[in-house]
Amino acid sequence: MAKLFEPFVLGNLTLKNRIIMAGMHTEFGRDGYLTERELAYYEERAKGGAAAIGVVARVSPEGGPESMAGVYDNTFEAGVRCLAERLHQHDCRLFIHLFHIGRNHGNDILGRPLLAPSAVPSPIYRHMPKEMTAEDIKRVKEDFADAAARCRAWGADGVTVNCSAGYLLSLFLSGETNQRTDEYGGSQENRFRFPLEVLARVREAVGRDFPVLVKISGSSMRARGYGLKDMEAFSFKLSGLADAIGVTGGWHEAPVPQITYQVPRGFYSCLSSCIKEHSGLPVICYNRINDRETAERILEEEKADLVACGRPFLADAGFAAKIRDGRPYHPCVGCNRGCMDRIIRNQEVRCIQNPELGSEYQKLSSLPAREGRVLVIGGGVAGMAAARFLGERGYQVTLKEKKGRLGGVLDQVAASPGKEGFLGIAAALEWDLKALGTHIVTDAMVTAEGLKAEADQYSFVVLAAGGKPRRMKGGTDAKIYLAQEVIQGNYRLWNRMNCGQTVIIGGDATAMETALFLAGKRWLEDSHQGFMERYVPDEVKERFLPSGTITLIEKEERAGRSLGGTRFIIMNELKQNHIKVMTGTRVVEAGNGYVIVQKGDSRERLCADFIIEAMGEEPEQALASILEEMQKEFYVVGDAAVTADIETAIRGAYELACSV
């Protein structure tokens, strides 16, 4: 299983391993110039073991937002040269992704209209683009060629022509977005013409001895767009024009999951393998390659020659080096919260696990070292992160956790379909803590008396013990389960719930994931599970499906508000599993076998054999009150302060470490 770290020869260029950091939008730049912030960001990933790094750069002023690097003017030369030199110091190569945004923006850029083959707006941004004239087509071809020549002259090691994801060149490939009647539209041959002419001009501009790559979507994944057969035909024509082909999934506006945790790891290797077979060129597989096992499998099965990992390098700059050395790394969990959800809105990229992303030029380790002992109470995400960051500042940290393991509620999160990777967050944090020499004590319940007795040993205390579940007000004779009790239950409980009428109070991530978790356990019993899955035909299984229902009650008018770009995926999954969502509705009474809900002025009685509360948590104040009485310096992070998601918990811990 060593192929991943074998060298690879690409044209006249030798890469030290098979891992490329994919070019990604960051929104870090200013006016097209590579800032010190960006240089430090890329260099940190070069130190982290990437064989090559992709940097997205616009080929013309209207080719992308002002926050994107530019390669259309010689004033940008110094930044590119500096970046190439800094990457080369770490035996890492620089590939510039030649980029034109096309219609994928909310407004005209720098007063210039968005360009597209036809005047068809993006379903995401809805801004009407300009249909390109013959003069526009000629000019854009020269923009790509001139940009490629500059990249070579400035010290880049290769260029990637972006023809994917619904950006300009890929718009010409699809009959949905290319409705032209001239030689650039209509037939497949005509729709291929403009991207192929761009590649021909790029090759002419840089010569035969400079690597030219092209990145494509293996399918647009749009009902009226292009499919894999079209891309097989397109890739066949790339011989002599490109040295390698990068293959990703669909367009950003495709109505299906793209790179979230619902997509199996390494899924797009099914596309890259077909392109590899039809093109005869080396192929790079992109997206959902978040671990060594997936990457190795793709290479060993010869579905690609290299792998391109983007978001794993956002979560952990040292991703490649850590998997090479067998060390735990902070894993990309495919949530999209800090990356795609923000970039689509033209905001700076973030990662829920990495608060130093974009701040590599002024990292925590660059701050003055501190001395002193610190007690952190709570071993969930917030507590582990606080202990890690405070340890990096120089403090001697003791971490106490009441359970027998670290990780807090991550095991509950990981029980949801597709979220198994969330357990890696705890594993990486625990490894960091042990490497820092953190004193970790589990099965350690911190009581008021114990805290009073030992608090003076520490410079300050960090409360990260989480919160307590929010419960309905008032008494009830109904048996009410908490969401975590359900997830930690067994098949007998799940089966009973799925055979009855189950009402879940709450309509955000936890409630939805609990509903989908239950739906995934339908008809299975402990003793019959393996037999049913392995031997019983689907049509027979259907007879055993329970007749129960699952209903979510959400008081807000919109369910799943915190889910961001994955909301439409989750809502579709709820619909497919026949899970009812009642919004703008509150529970006014719960009893044995029923709940009464109110929407506006109307009330309704629902049958409820089982009631589940999934309304989040509220801070637990007991230990804070003790420390206030003692006048002891303390800080609160995570759910112990306010109901927090993973990003808020980790970022809060980081900001605390920066400030104390």
Image (spheres, helix red, strand yellow):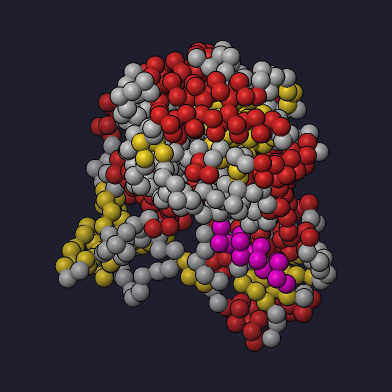
**Residue 145, position in %: x, y?**
58, 29
Q: Where is residue 632 in the image (x, y as percent from the top left)?
A: 70, 82
The single residue placed furthest to the front in the displayed view is 135
Question: In the drawing, does residue 101 fall left or right of residue 395?
Answer: left
Residue located farthest toward the left when viewing the structure as drawn: 602
Q: What stretch is highlighted in magenta?
A: 647-660
Residue 135 vs 643, above or below: the answer is above
Q: In which quarter of the image is the C terminus?
A: bottom right
Q: Give residue 100's position: percent from left, percent from top.
A: 50, 37
Q: Nearer the viewer, residue 355 or 391?
A: 355
Dominant SS type (magenta) = helix
The image quadrant of residue 583 is: bottom left
The answer to whether residue 467 is visible is: no
Which residue appears at 77% of the width and 74% of the height?
458
Residue at figure coordinates x 34%, y 18% from the top left: 187
Closer to the camera in the image, 26 or 272: 26
330 left or right of 477 in image: right
Locate the N terminus by quadrant. Answer: top right
Q: Is residue 485 above or below residue 246?
A: below
Q: In which quarter of the image is residue 25?
A: top right
Q: Locate residue 305, reporting x and y percent.
A: 62, 21
In the depicted structure, whether residue 23 falls above or below residue 636: above
The image quadrant that residue 492 belongs to is top left
Q: Is residue 76 magenta?
A: no
Residue 657 in the magenta stretch? The answer is yes
- Identify the residue shown where x is 21% and y is 59%: 606
- The residue positioned 46% from the left and 18% from the top of the image is 234
Look at the image and tell me whether residue 545 can be seen. yes
Residue 179 shown left or right of residue 68 in the figure: left
